[in-house]
Image (spheres, helix red, strand yellow):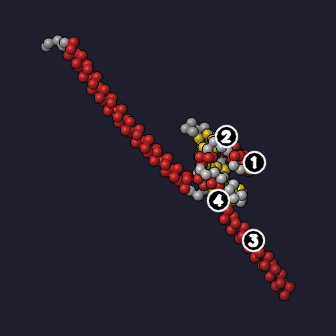
Amino acid sequence: IQPKSEHDVLRNAFQKMAVQLRENFEKIQREIAERKQVQEALAEERNLLRTLIDHLPDFIYVKDTESRFLIANTTLAHFVGATTPDELIGKTDFDFFPTELAEEFYTDDRAVIDLGQTLLNREEPNINQVTGTTKWILTTKVSFQDSHGTIVGLVGIGRDITERKRIEEALQRLNEELEQRVEARTAELARAN
């Protein structure tokens, strides 16, 4: 067996490095492709969620721990007199609502953020900032947490239940009227007997 020349040793080392580089390059290419797929899937998911948020008739929003809007949908933006949801980002309810009403919202936000309490299906009056009319909103607010379990804000949804409230009030008036009629008719019958 002939001893290997320095040239042969270098050639073998170079070939081994070339194989290792090729394997590493292919591994990096696979990782890049996988990351790209993950990023595309996340982008699709984000687009789906944004589409859902923007096309629901409910008010949907996310606030940080200082009650500043991080996300808002078109329905809420129009309700507060903004043209686009982006006009709400970084602002608070105090920028859009009368102070007394904004303070009520802020108090609710603090209970959710500071204490982790859930506000579930609260019926509350609200003022449409465009028309000035009072609307009844069914509000739910829940805290949201980061990956470490720390509360970093809240997610809220509000549904306009004004029409339902009008119907309930009309039914209440009709029930009261019917009860009065029954009482009057009962009294008439009692006098007749």
Does 47 appear above or below 138? above
Check residue 173 in the rendering and tell me which mark sits there, or answer none: 3
Report the mark closest to the observer, 1 or 2.
1
- Disc 1: which residue: 99
For the C terminus, the image quarter is: bottom right
Query: Which percent across, then down, holds residue 45?
Result: 47, 47
User: Horizontal placement of 149 versus 167: left or right?
Assistant: left
Q: Is residue 116 above or below residue 128?
A: above
Residue neighbourhood size for the residue with mark 2, other residues' Cα within 10 Å, grouped as few (<14), some (14–19), many (≥20): some
Q: According to the image, label 4 marks what residue?
A: 160
The residue type indicated by label 1 comes to: Thr
- Dot 4 and dot 1 residues touching (CB under 8 Å): no
Rendering coords of residue 184 (x, y %): 82, 80
Sequence-first tag of 2 and 4: 2
- Determine the residue located farthest toward the right in the rendered image: 191
Closer to the camera, 62 or 86?
86
Is label 3 in a helix, a strand or a loop? helix
| Residue identified by numbered label 2 | 66
Q: Report how far apart the C-alphas of labels 1 and 2 lie in the structure.
A: 16 Å
Report the residue that reaches farthest toward the bottom: 192
> Distance between the Cα atoms at labels 4 and 3?
22 Å
Q: Position of residue 167 (x, y in %)?
A: 68, 68
Q: Secondary structure at mark 2?
A: loop
Q: Residue at x 59, y 50 (%)?
A: 84
